[in-house]
Amino acid sequence: MTQEPVKQEKSRKFKAPLFAVAPMMDWTDKHCRFFHRGLTRRTLLYTEMLTSEAVIHGDRARLLAFDAEEHPVALQLGGSDPARLAEAARLGADFGYDEVNLNVGCPSDRVQSGTFGACLMLRPALVGRCVAAMKAAVDIPVTVKCRLGVDEQDIETALDGLADAALAAGADALWVHARKAWLKGLSPKENRDVPPLHYDRVYRLKARLPRTFIGINGGIAGLKDAGEHLGHVDGVMLGRAAYHDPGLLAAVDRVVYGEAGPDADLEAAALRMLPYAERHLAAGGRMPAVVKPMLGLFAGRPGARAWRRILTVEGVKEGAGPKVVEKALAAVAEAGGLAAPAEMAA
């Protein structure tokens, strides 16, 4: 069921530990988030970054609508005009998002031309004004996701300056991608891998701000690594690892949150997408958008290659529908990939 605009009445409080899937352009769309929710009840999910201008002037129903089952879900905004960000945040809150997040970390050419994203690391006072305006406009949490710094900035002073400005303005939490962003000389893709990771710098920020929610992001490969980081910070955010191997999300509620019971069933998560796909197709959509985030579900299991092949080859054909997923599941089952990990290891 697609979420209609609805005014939020209560703020969601940030409590540790918190596990999140990072906002990723062209990846964490509504189809991806609905699929991920079938694997984990507790994980905080983020939208792709939407610019404040797109939210204000664009097709809001298309950009902001989401399925009610996606909760908790956060809207990430890009922009640098406090008034515009405040208006976009209000619209997001009216649509029912649980949080609004300001992007202070994206290094793409698009955000550089618009002087937002990682460019804002150079303007902490402006970040403070943006956060203050957004806080005044909504009753849901306003958070910031940033880098350690950009270009030649000293990561000690740059991160502290950004954090202090955002928190003084009322930011409820700070997520830190533990790399610099190089606005000159590196592509957006290279900025995800080339700048070295400095997890210790994020740990020091948390030690300096013990009462502030500090989350960490960047290069985190799985739940074992996440657990180690949670010994130092309040939250962990996975990006590409969660997208390329979504099956790891099946264990989040047990491993991170300590909830009793077995991990989520991968087959059930796939079958949950069948009625979702029917609704999407009935509304004029196409099957590739639904199967795209599902490709890595059985990564590392018998039948994973057949699963990917069937979804990628047959899922893009004209008239493709939910039966493509059923066929791919049958191939995994035939290969023994639906067995529990303990059974496969026996």
Image: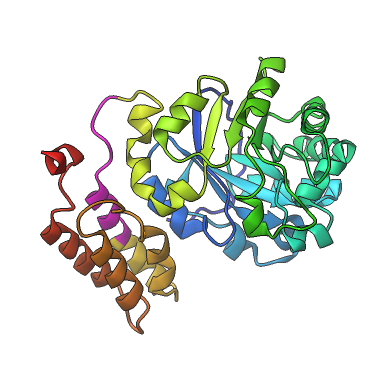
Residue 269 in percent (x, y) is at 29, 51
Q: Residue at x 26, y 71 (%)?
A: 324
Q: Foreground: 294 or 183?
A: 183
| Residue 148 position within the rendered picture, expressed as x and y whole percent measured from the top left | 72, 37
Q: Quadrant of residue 223?
A: top left
Q: For residue 264: magenta?
A: yes
Name the colour scheme: rainbow
- Residue at the image point whose x is 71% and y is 40% from the top: 146
Query: Which quadrant would the C terminus be assigned to in this image?
Result: top left
- Report the number of numbered marks: 0
The answer to whether residue 225 is left or right of residue 217 is left
Classify 257 as above or below 245.
above
| Residue 18 is at least partly visible in this image | yes
Residue depicted at x 56% and y 24%: 234
Residue 11 visible in the current orientation: no
Q: Is residue 311 above or below residue 163?
A: below
Which sits in the foreground, 279 or 221? 221
- Can you give x and y, in whole percent of width and height, for residue 131 in the image? 79, 37
Horizontal placement of 142 versus 43: left or right? right
Task: Determine if the magenta segment contains residue 92.
Answer: no
Task: Give how far across and how far down residue 119 sits, in percent.
Answer: 81, 49
**Left or right: 29 in relation to 325:** right
What is the magenta range?
260-273
Q: Quadrant of residue 58?
A: bottom right
Q: Quadrant of the N terminus?
A: bottom left
